[in-house]
Amino acid sequence: MTKTLILIPSRMAATRLPGKPLLKINNLSIISNVFKRAEEANIGKVVVATEDQEILEDVLKNGGNAVLTQSDHKTGTDRIFEAYKKLDITNVDYILNLQGDEPDINKDDIINLNNFMVNQDAEMGTLAAEIQDDKMLNNRNVVKVITDEKLAESNFPSALNFTRDNSSIDGQNIYHHIGIYSYKTTVLEKFVSLDQTNNEKINKLEQLRALDNKLKINVALAKSSPIGVDTEEDYLAIKKIMEYKI
């Protein structure tokens, strides 16, 4: 049976909203909300990877699993790879890297990505959603992915490029990229051994390192675009939505 490990990188030192992992929604921290959502997907063990003792203690206090990592990682992927090695869990086939600042991520999207990875024996996969508002195309904070085929619930096409710019062209398959990744463990090991590329550094998108090194990334269609908490406004918006659902 295929074995998946979900790892959630999280740290206090966010540039635009320091301390955001411990902000509360429904009396539970953002990071613990993400952990609970990942557990609900029921596809494998879930562990938070963090450099901060406060995050570790919060996750453990709320019944989750967490591991301390070094503080000098350049990317979240490097952090999850250290956590994977440190946990020393045997026979893991896939590692799913879930963002620690998207507490309202749809668990069905997590399940769907994992199913595609396993069923198609894919190397690396991610999610994308339809762009509902043209303003998103011009927003550099919204990462876009261009695929070789139109996304549908039944397919898992390849990513051709990731961009922050508005590069939409008539007939092009462009979507809102959702920063969740699933890797074969062997591919993750290869990825973190690669040097950062100029393309990655300029655009501040580590997935470009994979494409620059001919690693294939498949893309599954997400039901919706989760709100990532990057600013105070984001936090208040997602807090209102999630607390209204109760």
Image (cartoon, rainbow, N blue to C red):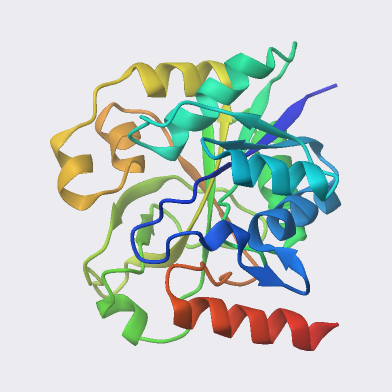
In the image, what residue occupies the spot 42% across and 31% down? 71
In the image, what residue occupies the spot 76% across and 59% down? 108
Relative vertical location of residue 22 with respect to residue 141 in this rendering, above or below:
above
Return the x and y of residue 111 as percentages of the image width and height.
Answer: 75, 49
- Which of the pair 96/19 is nearer the observer? 19
Return the x and y of residue 21 as percentages of the image width and height.
Answer: 57, 57
| Quadrant (top left/top right/bottom left/bottom right) for the N terminus | top right
Q: Quadrant of residue 141?
A: bottom left
Q: Is residue 73 left or right of residue 44?
A: left
- Which of the pair 52/97 is nearer the observer? 52
Q: Is residue 57 left or right of residue 128?
A: right
Relative vertical location of residue 79 with respect to residue 27 in this rendering, above or below:
above
Q: How many marks?
A: 0
Q: Is residue 127 left or right of residue 108?
A: left
Relative vertical location of residue 203 with respect to residue 192 in this rendering, above or below:
below
Q: Quadrant of residue 85?
A: top right
Relative vertical location of residue 175 with respect to residue 161 in this rendering, above or below:
below
In the image, what residue occupies the spot 30% across and 20% down? 194
Return the x and y of residue 126 as percentages of the image width and height.
Answer: 53, 47
Is residue 169 among what the camera can see? yes
Return the x and y of residue 173 as percentages of the image width and height.
Answer: 38, 65
| Quadrant (top left/top right/bottom left/bottom right) for the C terminus | bottom right
Is residue 123 among what the camera can see? no
In the image, what residue occupies the spot 78% across and 74% down? 26
